[in-house]
Image: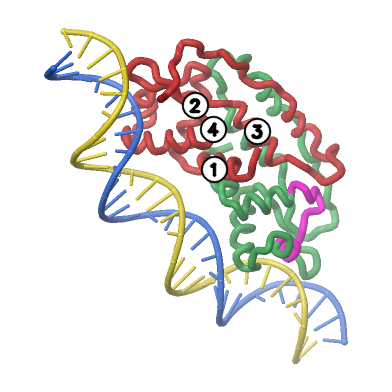
Chain colours: A green, B red, C yellow, D blue
Amino acid sequence: MEKSAALIAFAALGQETRLDVFRLLVKAGPEGMTAGAISEALDVRPNTLSTHLAALARSGLVHASREGRSIHYFADLSAVQALVLYLLQDCCGGQPELCAPIAELANAPVQPPGARPSARPIP
Amino acid sequence: MEKSAALIAFAALGQETRLDVFRLLVKAGPEGMTAGAISEALDVRPNTLSTHLAALARSGLVHASREGRSIHYFADLSAVQALVLYLLQDCCGGQPELCAPIAELANAPVQPPGARPSARPIP
DNA sequence: TCCATATTTCGAGAATAATCGAAATATGGA
DNA sequence: TCCATATTTCGATTATTCTCGAAATATGGA
């Protein structure tokens, strides 16, 4: 993962509404939620939310797919994994055993593809 | 972990200089680095760096301890763990097996205390 | 085709944050 | 005690980001 990508992702999570949105989508699981449902659940104006959803999507932390008139957003957990990996890269210089337990996260497979087959990509 | 704490931590990492500092401290390991050494390594003015170090310390991602005339800063990996935990809390509603691998991170012990015994606390 | 629903884009105003030079504080040693 | 080193605090300037109302776009159905 490149630094600029990590930077954008952390900045995305460093804003209250966006952090709320991401956590909500994590809870929602692979099905995700529509923009409207998120807007209602968090009581955020649709246009404001749209801006935040765009930021989250740009960061790779969430993805979107249109289904009928609505657009479903869902969290990408592998992005979280990549983020942590980036943070812990080169941990403790030559003695990774100092932080080994947390670094195990690096090898864990996450969220197998094909979880949501019934969606169209956003144009 | 509380939301406000997570928010502050993510915002701390969402800024280039601070992300660089944290990664540098992760590399440096439990010994950490002095503010001066960080300033030189990253080519950031001491007063600007001081502001960023204060933000990182406020967030709990780094801690400081004075040693002689210098102040050593070091990364707290357990803060990273807590952050990921917060993000993945309630993952996938009732079906945590959907994201189980990444969630294992939750139980890993990290960076046992007592790694740096020869330091004085900052007043 | 026309309409209602769902979401996004645009432009502007207000709030926050980053950076810097200058000055202040803390520490150890001569 | 006085000085040099290490770091922080202060105040101001510039840049970025958040939020909103209004208008635009996309979709499905009557």
Q: Nearer the viewer, residue B108 or B66?
A: B66
The residue type indicated by label 4 comes to: Gly
Who's the residue at 56% across and 13% down the image? B114
Relative to C22, A98 lies left or right: right
Who's the residue at 55% across and 39% down the image? B9
Q: What is the x, y in percent for residue C3?
A: 76, 88
Q: Residues within 10 Å of mark 3 (few under 14, many from 20)?
A: some
Task: Kindly report the distance in space between the C-alpha atoms of the residues bearing marks 3 and 2.
Answer: 15 Å
Q: What is the x, y in percent for residue B72?
A: 42, 21
Report if the CB atoms under discs 3 and 2 are less than 8 Å apart: no
The residue wearing badge 4 is: B60
Task: Kindly report the distance in space between the C-alpha atoms of the residues bearing marks 1 and 4.
Answer: 9 Å
Q: Is residue A32 magenta?
A: yes
What secondary structure is marked by label 3?
helix
Q: Residues within 10 Å of mark 2 (few under 14, many from 20)?
A: some
Q: Earlier in the sequence, mark 4 or mark 3?
A: 4
Magenta range: A26-38
The residue type indicated by label 1 comes to: Ile
Residue B8 numbered tag:
1
Report if the CB atoms under discs 2 and 4 are less than 8 Å apart: yes
Residue A98 numbered tag:
none
Q: What is the x, y in percent for residue A81?
A: 68, 36
Q: From what the image shows, is residue A107 above or below residue B30?
A: below
Q: From what the image shows, is residue A98 above or below residue B44?
A: above
Task: Kindly report the distance in space between the C-alpha atoms of the residues bearing marks 4 and 3.
Answer: 10 Å
Who's the residue at 72% across and 29% down the image? B105
Quadrant location, the N terminus of chain B = top right
Residue B63 numbered tag:
2
The residue type indicated by label 2 comes to: His
Q: What is the x, y in percent for residue A105?
A: 70, 28
The residue wearing badge 3 is: B82
